[in-house]
Amino acid sequence: MYEIEITRFQPQPTLQKFSVAEAVEASTVVSGVDDETAVIYVADIRDHADYGNFYVWLCAGRAYVRLDEHREHYGSFRDVTTVPRGEAVFFDEDGSTFNASLASTVSVASAKEALAHWLATGRAITALLWS
């Protein structure tokens, strides 16, 4: 079973919760998130055990990605020389904000691809570098 929470901030903060049985269903739910600013959280729960959590924070065309499997793993592009310098500001689920260097973020498309890959395989995508 996959527990999904999607926090949207426009026009006002809202939280949507979904429980789906299959990874393909979870992928369908999260692939439809096209908000400029949002937080996607997916938990893989089987036999009352948590097999991992995947977070995607979206803001202004960038995504901050974290995979929780026994510890936190953050995804970034392997070649950070192509990423502009600077920082992006992301909203957390509670509406607070945090900064992340652009080098530690990925494109929204890459984040969605990483999430879809994790849902399909249970593994981190190798296209990203995981800390």
Image: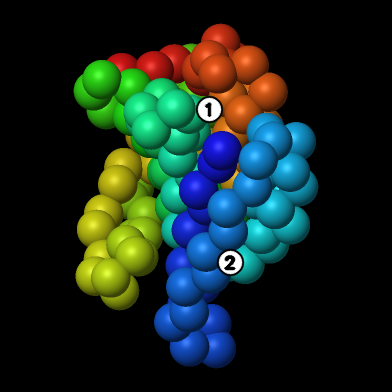
User: How packed is label 1: few (under 14 Cα within 10 Å), some, or many (20 or more)?
Assistant: few
Task: Report the residue at 44% width, 27% height from top.
Answer: 47
Residue 28 coordinates in the image, percent (x, y): 76, 47
**Is disc 2 placed on a helix, strand or loop?**
loop
Q: Is residue 34 above or below residue 63?
A: below
Q: How is the image coloured?
A: rainbow
Identify the amino acid type marked 1: Thr
Q: Is residue 59 above or below residue 54?
A: below
Q: Mark 1 highlights which residue?
A: 82
Residue 46 coordinates in the image, percent (x, y): 48, 29
* Residue sitting nearer the eye, 121 or 75: 121
- Of the 4 image quadrants, the one containing the C terminus is top left
Judge whether residue 90 can be spotted in this image: yes
* Residue sitting nearer the eye, 85 or 17: 17
Q: Mark 2 highlights which residue?
A: 36
* Residue sitting nearer the eye, 87 or 36: 36
Task: Report the residue at 27% width, 27% height from top.
Answer: 72
Residue 30 coordinates in the image, percent (x, y): 65, 50
- Of the 4 image quadrants, the one containing the N terminus is top right
Left or right: 97 in relation to 23: left
Q: Residue furthest bottom?
A: 11
* Residue sitting nearer the eye, 34 or 7: 7
Left or right: 25 in relation to 57: right
Identify the amino acid type marked 2: Glu
**Is disc 1 placed on a helix, strand or loop?**
helix
In the image, which is nearer the foreground, mark 2 or mark 1?
2
CB atoms of marks 2 and 1 within 8 Å: no
Judge whether residue 38 can be spotted in this image: no
Q: Number of callouts in the render?
A: 2
Task: Report the residue at 58% width, 66% height from top.
Answer: 36
The image's mark for residue 126 is: none
